[in-house]
Image: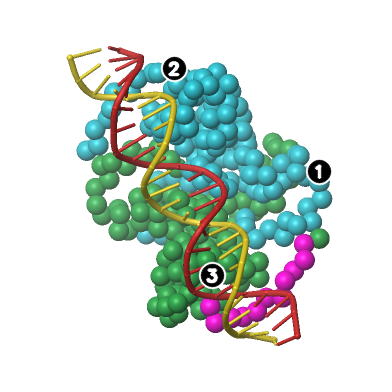
Chain colours: A cyan, B green, C yellow, D red
Amino acid sequence: MQKRKNHRMTRQRTVILEELKKVKTHPGADEIYAMVRKRLPRISLGTVYRNLEVLSELREIQKIGYVGTLKRFDGTPENHYHIRCIKCDRLDDALIEIETNLENKVRPYTNYSIIGHRLEFIGFCPECAKSPQEDAYQTEL
Amino acid sequence: MQKRKNHRMTRQRTVILEELKKVKTHPGADEIYAMVRKRLPRISLGTVYRNLEVLSELREIQKIGYVGTLKRFDGTPENHYHIRCIKCDRLDDALIEIETNLENKVRPYTNYSIIGHRLEFIGFCPECAKSPQEDAYQTEL
DNA sequence: GTACCTGCAAAGCTTTTGCAACTGG
DNA sequence: CCAGTTGCAAAAGCTTTGCAGGTAC
């Protein structure tokens, strides 16, 4: 049985949490680092990574996993879907309800024991939709 | 407009494609490298990466993007859903139909122009379901 | 007081890339 | 022939980690 640590609320942890809650898009560690650094100039990247990990254990935030090339985090701990821009990798929330029946649909066809699902919509964000999409003969959805 | 290269079918490319088509799970580059190396011992990892990229441009395979910590590829170019083991990161196909109406559901709620979606089920694979799941107080779905 | 946390820097892991030699069509 | 490809090795990009000094409780 994994032993739970007694976590403390340090200044760094508090600020990271606050900054992450402020934004609606879902930044990677480097962006969070930049945001937090405005208030705590001496914080280190390692601390940011460690705290994001701890905060998600505490269920204060949600670890989204890799999106694009970066691990992402979400200030909203409740489960929800996302929309990703295929061009700039921006990630936003999708404001529709969770479709739990999807899991029931797949159960008869698999020998995995299903405990959840992730749904990500893909498209062009308002910014990227403006400019012509010549090069995007997208190979990855 | 992006210029298309004239791709050649080299021995390396052929073998990579064949090996990838053989398996139902979706290996990362390192695993593919290991598989291919049995037939072409002198191939390099760089070649594997470059060919996976080329093959997905050619629509012979599908680039899945990051799953777990690795980029994954899929020998089946047709779109379909996946199931990932939360414990060992194994990835299998989910044999249910694509739900295109999901995209219509989200359109009214976003200013992205939606072009697709990815759905990934999460659970324990048959292997990992056997052993007790003590430590998995999972923070990431 | 002490378990937990921090900054720093080094290490780690996966993927990408420069280059000179090679080769498919 | 020659654009495209390969093996090798180095570089790049992001994340994790060891350590010694600090700090929340």
- Separation of residues labelled 3 and 1 (CA atoms): 36 Å
Q: Residues within 10 Å of mark 1 (few under 14, many from 20)?
A: few
Prevailing secondary structure of the magenta residues: loop
Callout 1, which amino acid? Lys
Residue contact between numbered discs 2 and 3, judged by CB atoms under 8 Å: no
Residue C8 at x, y percent in the picture: 43, 30
Residue B22 visible somewhere in the drawing: no
Check disc 1 and report its element: helix, strand or loop: helix
Callout 2, which amino acid? Arg
Q: Which one is nearer the viewer's eye here, D7 or B133?
A: D7
Q: Which one is nearer the viewer's eye here, A69 or B78?
A: A69
- Separation of residues labelled 2 and 1 (CA atoms): 41 Å
Residue B85 at x, y percent in the picture: 39, 53
Inspect the magenta stretch and tell me whether residue B127 lies in it.
no
Do marks 2 and 1 both belong to one polypeptide chain?
A: yes
Do marks 3 and 1 both belong to one polypeptide chain?
A: no
Q: Is residue A44 above or below residue B74?
A: above
Q: Is residue C11 above or below residue B2?
A: above
Image quadrant in which you'd find residue A89:
top right
Q: Which residues are magenta?
A: B2-12
Check disc 3 and report its element: helix, strand or loop: helix
In the rendered structure, find residue B47 and report the number of the disc placed on it: 3
Label 2 sits on residue = A11
In the rendered structure, find residue A130 and report the number of the disc placed on it: 1
Q: Which one is nearer the viewer's eye here, A42 or B129?
A: A42
